[in-house]
Image (cartoon, rainbow, N blue to C red):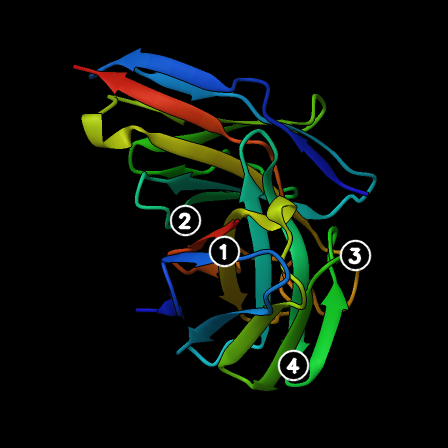
Amino acid sequence: AQKITQTQPGMFVQEKEAVTLDCTYDTSDQSYGLFWYKQPSSGEMIFLIYQGSYDEQNATEGRYSLNFQKARKSANLVISASQLGDSAMYFCAMRVFAGGTSYGKLTFGQGTILTVHP
Amino acid sequence: DVKVTQSSRYLVKRTGEKVFLECVQDMDHENMFWYRQDPGLGLRLIYFSYDVKMKEKGDIPEGYSVSREKKERFSLILESASTNQTSMYLCASSFSTWARGATMQFFGPGTRLTVL
């Protein structure tokens, strides 16, 4: 079974500063993918960034980057130059590729609420 | 753009009522999912479907059933609603693939269900 742990229920950051949201995972599978989603107060889940377990480079998407440390089983999200609009709930999720067609099932962490102060 | 729609944003039902939550996607995705979201617990998978009339239990299927008669539509059914089913319900869809890629799930806006 897979497990995702986000140990920070809430985080605060000053506008324009960088912030790191922690995510650790547990799986016995060697092939897996890690996702980060953002959920604003409107409720819709927005995909941010993806990292495959065999990807050699850390993923980056604009102001988002993923600090992937495979040996430590961590996949922390780094948001640079925080903006007020970054205030939201952030979820880390994992999908394993256990052979055959993947139905794309995701296992989610508990989420971290990020508040950006002006 | 992929669009996943859910029939209601807010719903209030009474204990014992039968409740239907509808989800429709317009991108011809094979897979569809129902999650519930509770504070401190994140999203938990209730059921998913990988084809018409095909379904599999997720992590918390008790008290729920699903129906997928058409590819674009996936319904979540609470046969007899209870107060502990008060929650946010999120529907999602994705392509099936053999590839190890970022086949992310696309989510609907959610239905906040209150059972009194």
Q: How far separated are the C-alphas under marks 3 and 4?
A: 19 Å
Residue A102 x, y percent position in the rendering: 69, 64
Pinpoint the chain carrying mark 4: B
Residue type of the residue flagged with mark 3 = Ala
Pinpoint the chain carrying mark 3: A
In the rendered image, the vertical position of residue A24 relative to residue A96, given as above or below: above
Q: How far separated are the C-alphas under marks 4 and 1?
A: 19 Å
Crowd rating for badge 1 (residues with CA inside 10 Å; few <14, some 14–19, many 20+): many
User: At 65% from the left edge and 72% from the top edge, which residue is drawn?
Assistant: B66
SS class, disc 1? strand
Per the image, the residue denoted by label 2 is A45
Quarter of the image for residue B64 reads: bottom right
Pinpoint the chain carrying mark 1: B
Mark 3 or mark 2, which is nearer the start of the sequence?
2
Marker count (numbered): 4
Pinpoint the chain carrying mark 2: A
* Mark toward the viewer: 4 or 1: 1
User: At 50% from the left edge and 33% from the top edge, which residue is drawn?
Assistant: A58
The answer to whether marks 4 and 2 mark residues whose Cβ atoms lie closer than 8 Å is no
Mark 1 or mark 4, which is nearer the start of the sequence?
4
The answer to whether marks 1 and 2 mark residues whose Cβ atoms lie closer than 8 Å is yes
